[in-house]
Image: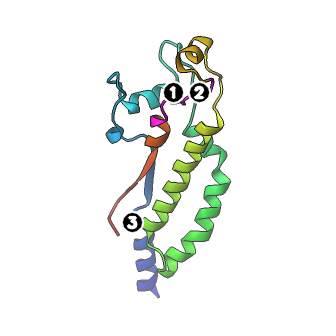
């Protein structure tokens, strides 16, 4: 029994972290600004206050804690039984979290764009211009490959 519990514990510890956001590999805009920088400025707001905070990661992920808890509750027994690897579970959790973030951008995030931004973009939806920021949101599982 102790060996079985040790094996289960080992399986649960592997790949026990998933990062969700805009990776450094997401690239740049035509102006040479990295999508990571654009994401960070919009997530936290600009230092000069010109661009307000429009959280497309922290707020939507916190708002969906119950959804992630349900995924955890339903999937961890599969990991314990060996029907699903921890990496597979973390991939499912990461995909769900990235989807929540992307959906929040599509639904519109407050505050609204400034009139000058609307004129430049031709749209009043914050964080949506070319769609590259939204499309760049992904996840990465940290840990062993099993």
Dot 2 and dot 1 residues touching (CB under 8 Å): yes
At x 51%, y 81%, the residue is 81
Q: Position of residue 140 (x, y in %)?
A: 40, 52
Residue nearer the viewer, 66 or 1: 66
At x 63%, y 23%, the residue is 124
- The span shown in magenta is 124-132
Q: Position of residue 67 (x, y in %)?
A: 65, 56
Q: Which mark is residue 42?
A: 1
Q: Residue furthest front?
A: 122
Q: Secondary structure at mark 1?
A: helix
Q: Which mark is residue 112?
A: none
At x 44%, y 27%, the residue is 38
**Residue named by callout 2:** 126
Q: Is residue 125 magenta?
A: yes
Task: Kindly report the distance in space between the C-alpha atoms of the residues bearing marks 2 and 1.
Answer: 9 Å
Image: 129 above or below 140: above
Task: Kindly report the distance in space between the C-alpha atoms of the residues bearing marks 1 and 3.
Answer: 33 Å
Q: Residues within 10 Å of mark 1 (few under 14, many from 20)?
A: some
**Residue named by callout 3:** 14
Residue nearer the viewer, 92 or 76: 92
Of the image marks 2 and 3, the number of the one nearer the N terminus:
3
Q: Residues within 10 Å of mark 3 (few under 14, many from 20)?
A: some
Residue nearer the viewer, 101 or 123: 123
Image: 29 above or below 118: below
Task: Kindly report the distance in space between the C-alpha atoms of the residues bearing marks 2 and 3.
Answer: 38 Å
Q: Position of residue 121 (x, y in %)?
A: 53, 20
């Amino acid at each position: 029994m102790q060996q079985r519990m040790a094996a289960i514990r080992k399986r649960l510890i592997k790949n026990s972290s998933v990062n969700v956001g805009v990776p450094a590999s997401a690239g740049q805009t035509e102006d040479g600004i990295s999508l990571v920088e654009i994401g960070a400025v919009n997530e936290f707001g600009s230092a000069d206050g010109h661009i307000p905070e429009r959280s497309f990661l922290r707020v939507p992920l916190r708002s969906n804690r119950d959804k992630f808890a349900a995924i955890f509750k339903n999937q961890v027994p599969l990991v314990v039984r060996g029907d699903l690897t921890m990496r597979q579970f973390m991939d499912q959790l990461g995909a769900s979290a990235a989807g929540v973030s992307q959906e929040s951008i599509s639904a519109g995030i407050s505050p609204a764009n400034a009139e000058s931004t609307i004129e430049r973009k031709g749209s009043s939806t914050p964080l949506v211009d070319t769609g590259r920021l939204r499309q760049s949101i992904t996840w990465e599982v940290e840990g062993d490959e099993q």
